[in-house]
Amino acid sequence: MPICEAFGSCAPNVKWIVMSEEISSHAVFSNAFTLLLKLWRFDQPPLEHRMDAVPVGAHLTPEYLLLVRNSQLTSSDDLQKDQSKIKRLTRLSSPLSGEPIFLDSFPKLTLWYRQHQACIASPLSGLVPGTPVHQIVEALLNFMFRKINRTGQSLTPAISGSSSSSGPGNEDVSLHLKLPAWDILEAVPFVLDAALTGCAHGRLSPRELATGLKDLADFLPASLATIVSYFSAEVTRGIWMLASMNGTDW
């Protein structure tokens, strides 16, 4: 969580050379974020979609992970006589602090997690034109569907609902995407909603949508988590028509 909070707040122009390989802050963040999701068991189906017993790890929310960590710290006094347990506790606990840590200690992670929960609970809303988030949304849409934009079709206004915008130019796209990972993740749900709306209204083909999603995931692998949670929630709501691709209705 500290790694996600720190590196997700860095612009991608911060890079390091490790074993002749260039590593960006986005790469470090995506790796740490993916590990956090594995610890969280993010891939577990929601409880309401399971007919059997509660699965192991179903309650492994970020809050629960921190609760386990904090409880280990408070119980350390009872383990003084067992050196093997003490060593194990030392490995599991953060070496940076012996104090309890709560989710609010990571404001960027908390913001993403609240947005993640909101996307699952109800249809997306709240994107205000002209705000920094809206500008990032438009930049990501132009990045994902740049081949369509080159044909002269104004994709962004039709998808994002900004009737007065013609979409940023290539130089603006590059500028907007050189942002901290957390800022990009905040915009991703709105990008997905806009792209899905464009596909439903015939402005994007299903293949173009799939290709754009791949480009987004390649650009910031951590965005896969939001892609999965958003589309899973939308499928359960059942408000979208099927789309045909490769002879199959999806």
Image: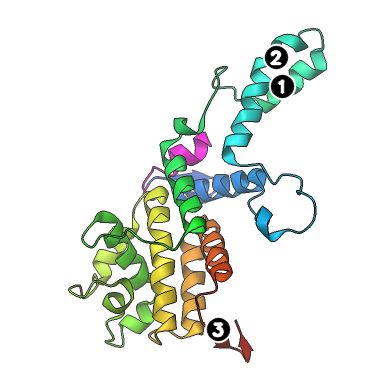
Quick check: 210 above or below 128? below
The disc, 3 or 2, on the residue closer to the chain's N-terminal end is: 2
Label 2–label 1 contact, CB within 8 A? yes
Q: In this view, does 64 lie to the left or right of 155?
A: right
Q: Position of residue 128 (x, y in %)?
A: 26, 59
Amino acid at dot 3: Leu
Labelled disc at residue 242: 3
The x, y position of residue 141, in whole percent, is 36, 70
Residue 129 lies, in percent from the top left, at 23, 63
Q: Which residue is drawn at 55% across and 83% down?
A: 242
Assign a secondary structure to mark 2.
helix
Above or below, 156 relative to 114: below
Q: Do the residues labelled 3 and 2 touch (CB within 8 Å)?
A: no
Farthest-out residue, bottom: 247
Query: In the figure, is residue 46 to the left or right of 86?
Result: left
Crowd around label 3: few <14 · some 14–19 · many ≥20 (10 Å): few
- Tell me if mark 1 has few (under 14), some (14-19) or many (20+) residues whose alpha carbon lies within 10 angstroms of its own: some
Q: Residue 89 carries which label?
A: 1
Tell me the number on the disc at residue 80.
none
Q: Is residue 68 magenta?
A: no
User: Residue 76 has which mark?
Assistant: 2
| Amino acid at the residue labelled 1 | Leu
The residue at the far left in this view is 164
Q: Can residue 19 be seen in this view?
A: no
Three-letter amino acid code of the residue under disc 2: Ser
- Residue drawn where x is 44% and y is 37% of the image: 6
Q: Is residue 55 visible?
A: yes
